[in-house]
Amino acid sequence: MLGAALLWFQMMQPLEWLGVSPPPLEELTVERTIIDDDGLALKVRAGGSEPMRIAQVQVDGAYWRFLQEPAGELARGQAAWLRIAYPWVEDELHEVTFVTGTGVTFGHTIEVAEATPQPSIAQLSGYGVIGLFVGVLPVALGMCLLPALQHAGTRGFQFTLSLTLGLLAFLLVDTLEAGLALGAEAASLFQGPALVWLAALAGFLALMAVGRRHHRPPEGRALAWYIALGIGLHNLGEGLAIGGAFATGAGALGTFLVIGFTLHNLTEGVAIAAPLTRQSVPAWAWGGLVVLAGLPAVLGMWLGAYAFAPHWSALFLGLGVGAILQVCVEVTDYLRRTAVMEGMSPVSGTSASGVVAGIAIMYTTAFLVQV
Amino acid sequence: MITQGEVDHVRNGFDPSVMLTDWDTGKVGRLASGQRLREYTITAIDKEIEIAPGIRFPAWTYNGRVPGPSLRATEGDRIRIRFVNAGSHAHTLHFHGIHSAQMDGVPGAGEAAPGEAFTYEFDAEPFGCHLYHCHSLPLKRHIHKGLYGAFIVDPNPQRHPEHEPAARSRLLGSEENARWQEFVMVMNGFDTNFDEENEIYAVNTVAHAYVNRPIRLERSRPARIYLINVTEFDPVNSLHLHANFFDYYDHGTTLTPTLRTVDAVMQCQAQRGILEFSFADHEPGRYMFHAHQSEFVELGWMSLFEVV
């Protein structure tokens, strides 16, 4: 049926009955930029209604000869590398303009030209160390507060869980914003923003289903694992952003900023520790939680620096949003149940101030990392 | 740097290398009064042209080419032009010259609707390097889409006894003129994405055409360029000649230079002039000439003389 209908449409061309023959729509997105001794290399993806041809390339308002691989017209969704032997100037801005066969232009700005990192042991280690400082170290330090939390009373426990909820709420907003921003940079074909929302929804539903597969909500150590997963995905996104900023020279990431992220992420460890205060935690679990929550930052750094593509980032960040939303729901539920068990109201001065404190801590420490 | 690839001049139906010298002197006849008559036919046609390798521009053209035919006459000739509008919009021929109001080629006087025609008639005055263009509205779009061309009026030597040798050297068909290597160069630009900034600059339309095929210039003969600026959107355009200097005749309406020994000249839109120079004392080789708005150079307005 569908085949026949499509065939009929193709043969009869009912669009011609409308009497309009608009020029083909063209769309071009730059997905990656590599800057090295050979000049500039850009990975572009076409998203036109018909195959399109990149006729000429301007750099800083001058035509430059370029090499396209693969050569020729670009079909919808097809990507190609363009290499331009351009004598770029370190630390300065360059504007690349693609002129298509129909004379339409697409601009791409290289904000600050810096040689793209070449994978080397030293560089990988460098990014790895930054990832450890941004992801693993703060989570581990935060979790070291576990013994202190274990000695807190019922109110202290409620406060810690509420604090965690506030913190997760901040991460939810932060991850969603980052995901939507990256999604907007993706080729229109991939519908970046929709990808973020849908990945979030799918991630949330899947984790909820997995978490409650035994017909009861996760708590204790299980809840800690889910929180670690959500935070891990958030840290992956943070790593992608920092790595990408390094690679494109857009962020002059100094020591100050790395320390800022370390402080900002300290509370993440507290969040993971919060549901563990009423049980013993073996060393392997403790280590596993740190790795799950913190190590994705290292992975994100590497991906961001060497293999940056906005649609993949949008997908991962969307999943992160879903994972964080799941733990928000479960922590809230856990908070409610423990309060009821202790004969307290789930919405109390303690829990409210905990949530506000969590958001406030994240917001103020974020001052250190906003540039 | 430079544009990549080659333009298909055959498909365009015009070749910038040929355009340099292909004067259209019209069909010559005589009026009862004895005055020489030159008759031309110019047709406005919508046509997609390739202005740089791979870049197609939906142009409006005179006779299918941009710039339109280089009309050449002698001062005092009667000019009669049958203008046929085969395009999709109203168009005119507005001449920079001396004529009556009804022959001005503006809306309300000599504008031809699509499918219609109009005949312009006037005397070729004054001598000089002039131009014609469409004056329909919106003017900016009608000009930058490609409706313009050169209108060269040679001086009649008999009318200029005090400068007869100079006048004779400018008169096409004279023995003195045959020594000269003459070129018409219309500086133009194309806004391919219609954002009111040109993506392409050129002389005679095709970006970097005379880099890919340098213009042959014999050292033993003097050179003369009829230079006309029709560039839209930018206030001025210019020409700078490398390794040499030239005399310049603003508008070409004098027989003595208005500027002597310069190597760069600036023109606003519709300004034009004649450049005269010689490479007699130079060694053979390639000599550049280009706009000295360096921006224009690498966007297409860059050229070479192959001096032999």
Image (cartoon, coloured by chain):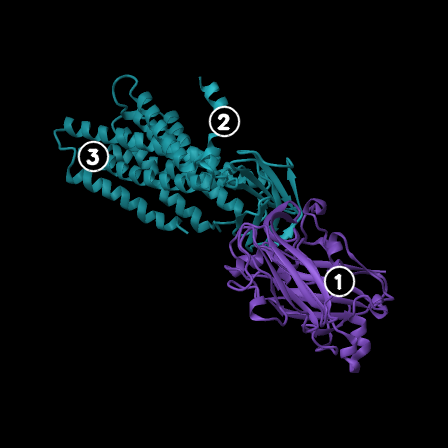
Q: Nearer the viewer, residue A112 or A341?
A: A112
Chain for numbered disc 2: A
Work out whether disc 3 and disc 2 sit on a shared chain. yes
Residue, x 28% and y 32% (percent of image)? A328
Residue B205 place in picture, x, y as percent: 66, 55
Chain A tint as drawn: cyan
Looking at the rendering, in which quadrant would you find the C terminus of chain B?
bottom right
Residue furthest right as drawn: B220
Residue A146 place in picture, x, y as percent: 30, 34
Q: CA distance from mark 3 to mark 2?
A: 68 Å
Q: Quadrant of residue A120?
A: top right
Chain for numbered disc 1: B
Residue B244 place in picture, x, y as percent: 77, 69
**A278 sits left or right of B269 in the view:** left
Q: CA distance from mark 3 to mark 1?
A: 104 Å
Residues at marks 3 and 1 touching, judged by CB atoms closer than 8 Å: no
- Local secondary structure at mark 1: strand
Provide the residue designation for mark 1: B28
Chain for numbered disc 3: A
Residue furthest front as drawn: B32
Provide the residue designation for mark 2: A12
Provide the residue designation for mark 3: A158
Residue, x 67% and y 56% (percent of image)? B41
Chain B tint as drawn: purple
Residue A167's disc number: none
Q: Tell me the kind of residue under disc 1.
A: Val
